Amino acid sequence: MDGGRVPGTVRFGIATFVTDEGIRPAALGRALEERGFDSVFLAEHSHIPTSRESPYPGGGDLPRVYYRTLDPFVTLAAMADATTDLLLGTGIILLPQRDLIHTANEAASVDLISDGRLVLGVGAGWNREEMRNHGVDPKKRGPLMTEQLAALKELWTSDEAEFHGEHVDFDPVYLWPKPARSPHPPIYLGGESDAALTRLVEQGDGWLPRGGQSPEDITRLRAWLADHGKPDVPTTLFGGPTDPEKLAPYVDSGDLERVTFMLPTRPEAETLSILDDYAKVAERFS
């Protein structure tokens, strides 16, 4: 995946929350592939504490989908069985809240059964109450995730993996299956903070900036990444604009390999209608 793309070669995917109230995973996967989308990126929240101390980053009340999200790896496995070419992404898993060894096994399993189609998008998370329920100190989630990413690669690539860090520590272990893709599925880091970008330089294979970032912001930050040893990092815009006039500067910038459109969670018929509209937008830039 080459992040230094020329204008007019951007691919298009979908980012969404799959819940118990919307279109089923297999039907969604088939619909995306039929309409020419190259990828899907699924959000994750294991649960939402009833206390609402952490403000929703989008402002206002926390949307209903956050309370009802299906497990991303189970969902992607269902999509894998219903598709042949669709890239199966997490956008994002909250890695600090997860057991690392289970995550390594789940992700490798999805990559194996999909013949190497997993894209692992990861982030540190924002809901402090949710983290604490998983036994995670919010102040340490960044350093924890940095070590988790390094340990994850060891689990995926070594027959006898071990890791000894401040936050992650285990003696030699066997873990199979290994991912189908060599050396491992690409790991995309979400976020635009200094800490997130530094983590991307150290451990990431790609970048998932949010759609609120302007084309100029993305160009500037990619230049920073290049200056710090990460040139031409593959970049997927997460939740890009569906208005063609607003989308055009992102496509023409040459900075993006892909734009994902944020798909609202709706029943099947309504979802298919929305996807038809999104596909028409994507076709204008093909």
Image (tube, grey):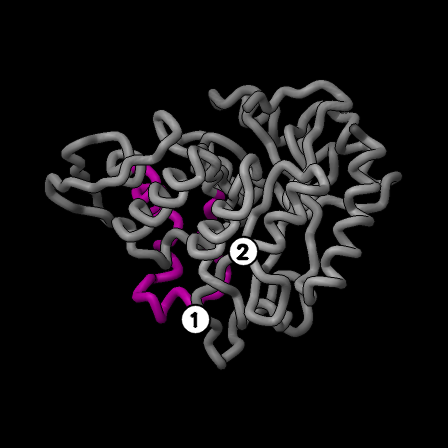
Q: Is 34 covered by the magenta stretch?
A: no
Q: Please name the predominant secondary structure of the magenta segment in the image.
A: helix
- Per the image, label 1 sits on a secondary structure element best described as helix
Of residue 275 and residue 91, the one placed in the foreground of this image is 275
What percent of the width, then of the height, locates residue 213? 69, 42
Q: In the displayed structure, would residue 136 be above or below residue 189?
A: below
Q: Which residue is mark 2?
A: 43
Query: In the shown orientation, is residue 9 left or right of residue 225?
Result: right
The location of residue 265, given as percent across then percent down, is 66, 63
Q: Which residue is found at the position 39% from the left and 60% from the top? A: 138
Q: Which residues are magenta?
A: 121-150
Q: Amino acid at mark 1?
A: Glu
Q: Position of residue 237 (x, y in %)?
A: 65, 39
Residue type at numbered disc 2: Ala
Q: Is residue 239 left or right of residue 147?
A: right
| Quadrant containing the N terminus in the rendered view | top right
Give coordinates of residue 165: x percent, y percent: 21, 42
